[in-house]
Amino acid sequence: MADSTTTRPRVVRAVSQIMGVAEQQVTDTSSADSLDTWDSLRHMNLMLALEEEFGIKFSDEQIMTMSSVGRIVAGIDELLR
Amino acid sequence: MPLKTLAEIEDALRRADLAPLPSLDLVILRNVVLEPIAPYLRYLAYGMGHNARVHFGEFDQVFQEAVGGRREFLNEETTGVLLFTALDVLSWNLSRNFSALSASDVRREVDQIAAFIDAVLAGLRRQTPAMILWHSFELPLPPALGILDGQRADGQTAVVAQLNERLRSALAGAGSAYLVDMNACRARVGAASFRDARYWHIGRAPYSREALREIAQQDFTFLRALKGKQKKCLVLDCDDVLWGGIVGEDGLGGIKLGRTYPGSAYYELQQEIVSLHHRGVILAICSKNNEADVWEVFRNHPDMLLREEHIAAARINWRDKATNLRELAAELNLGLDSFLFVDDSEVECELVRSVLPEVEVLHLPRDSAVEHRDRLAAAGWFDTLTLSEEDRLRASSYKAETARTKLRGDSPDLETYFRSLEMVVQIRPADRLSIPRLAQLTQKTNQFNMTTRRYSDEQITRLAAGGSSDVLGLRLSDRFGDAGLVGVGILRYEGADAIIDTFLLSCRVLGRGVEDAFLVQCLRRAKARGARTAVAEFIKTAKNQIAADFYPTRGFRPVDSGAVQRLELSLDSFSGSEPAFFKRIETFEDLTHTKE
């Protein structure tokens, strides 16, 4: 069953791959404000990649509000619950 | 190369050493947000050995970028320009307000879009010779008038289809410009998954991840063909690919192959293979088997669609497949990178992948035979930008040449040999269908080519349409096959002179009297048009020595020996006749001279 202990590493890996930063640099507070490469276009790529990774579909509202790793993990867990 | 997830692709691209690869510059002009397509395009380019640089034009600035110019990325070096003009943005009226429009409103919108298309193409062609890929307009789903829409010639569906037709014909006139069928992409992905309303509303990005992946793959089918990276030869395993079971163990009667299940899966795969053969794909066999067992199936199985004559080369033995593939490449004079290798065995596939990474491998597992036909057909490995008649015939010409050589050895003299070939020559003026091939011949023929003047489709079209010239094409077939269009003659009429501007034959049909039959026909045509003197031109090149004494030995008298040599023959007394060994010579006036 999915919970944040299995969700987080997968999110971190996706953020690292899409934003082009090392996994160690990605924390719960990593966000569009803290990472230079996290712009609106990369945000879209990240959302697409996460939907592919987890086989889920975010609502448009989630896409707009999941602006940090912590919020993304929580949002995904919500969908998987 | 199988496509990975978006995150894996981004990661693989970051790790790959792209810098040393030749660059592939793509420019995307669009009226929607498409940035997420870039990783797919770059990854596909990497798969064919290129480092793609993807430049995006400004959002909804298609016209400005095309006509105004961004020389830093639209220039001589650009490989491809990808155009995305979603109707939702291009014409709100046609896409979202259709039912409120009058017939004249619709006409005005359509004309405006057609003018936009023409202006964009003209603008692009001023800036770059790059391949242009214009993504077609998506048919409305659901259409504006609901179930009524499809009943009406002025429905939204019909109007969008008409726009696509205008686009298609505009592209056809722009040279190296192609329509990418978005409706076919949508059908393959599934309409419900093609667009993503969330990203459309959030960021004017209409297409789903699956759609972008499919569109990128479709674009690369064109780009591969442009770069000559498409596959040319299909190398087939036999047991559990062409038929079910092992012929060496199950015997001719025991293998699965026929019109009904389970043999129908293999039968339909063979249909697809034969159809590829007719598109010019070269077929080869690479099988671990006793050779005699395999050929027995080819010769004697009643449901075997694939025949020996379809197979250009075979390696049926117990050696490893990598060695056999290398030998096949050498025998067929093809690069290994033009091979698609098909096998049911994971082990064989892995061996080829690791030893010969340049060979594309298609693994068709034994337990999914019913899907094999679709898998072979779907990928577009062999797609080409043009399909000339000659491409269709090329695959069989290998076999025919072998048969001709044998017949020649059996004939007591040349004349008997020529007669036994039963050659049929057809001479026809250029028309819409033959023009691309005639232009191709002027561009490719080097040896038996009197003037080596290279003409584009456009130039041939003008010469053929002009009242003071004739463009003639020659087709040749014989009892072993059809060689297709292999000769071009261009005559220009000036006063009483018929100037032979171009006279060429593909060298694979030389030495069979075809050149004489063609010359006689050209001269007869010139005389019929009232010319009194034939003026042949000859331009010496490093490669056309074999053509040098053609005119002098046919009675032409040199009159001018500049860079363009001129030789004359009076037509007043001309009554030449073709060699007698042709079975038939058909001229463009449909006069048939049957010999014998």
Image: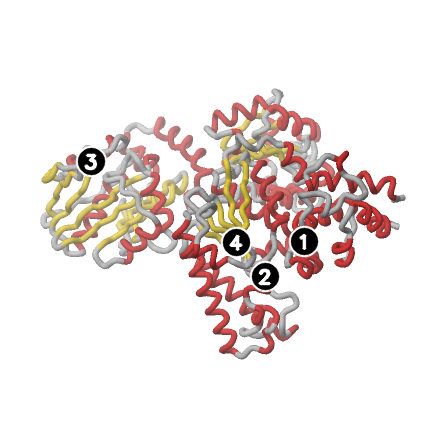
SS assignment at label 4: strand
Residue tagged by mark 1?
Answer: B208
Q: Position of residue B19 (x, y in %)?
A: 54, 32
Of the two numbered discs 3 and 4 in the rendering, the one whose residue sits closer to the viewer: 4
Earlier sequence position, callout 3 versus callout 1: 1
Residue tagged by mark 3?
Answer: B550
Q: Position of residue B559 (x, y in %)?
A: 9, 40
Position of the C terminus of chain B, as image quadrant, is: top left
Instruction: Using a 10 Å C-alpha cutoff, classify the residue at mark 1 as few (fewer than 14 neighbours), some (14 to 19) or many (20 or more).
Output: many
Of the two numbered discs 4 and 2 in the rendering, the one whose residue sits closer to the viewer: 4
Residue tagged by mark 2?
Answer: B138
Amino acid type at mark 4: Leu
Q: Position of residue B142 (x, y in %)?
A: 66, 68
Q: Which residue is located at x 46 percent, y 38 percent? A: B396
Amino acid type at mark 2: Glu
Instruction: Tell me the chain of label 4.
Output: B
Q: Which residue is located at x 66 percent, y 32 percent? A: B239
Q: Is residue B408 left or right of residue B219?
A: left
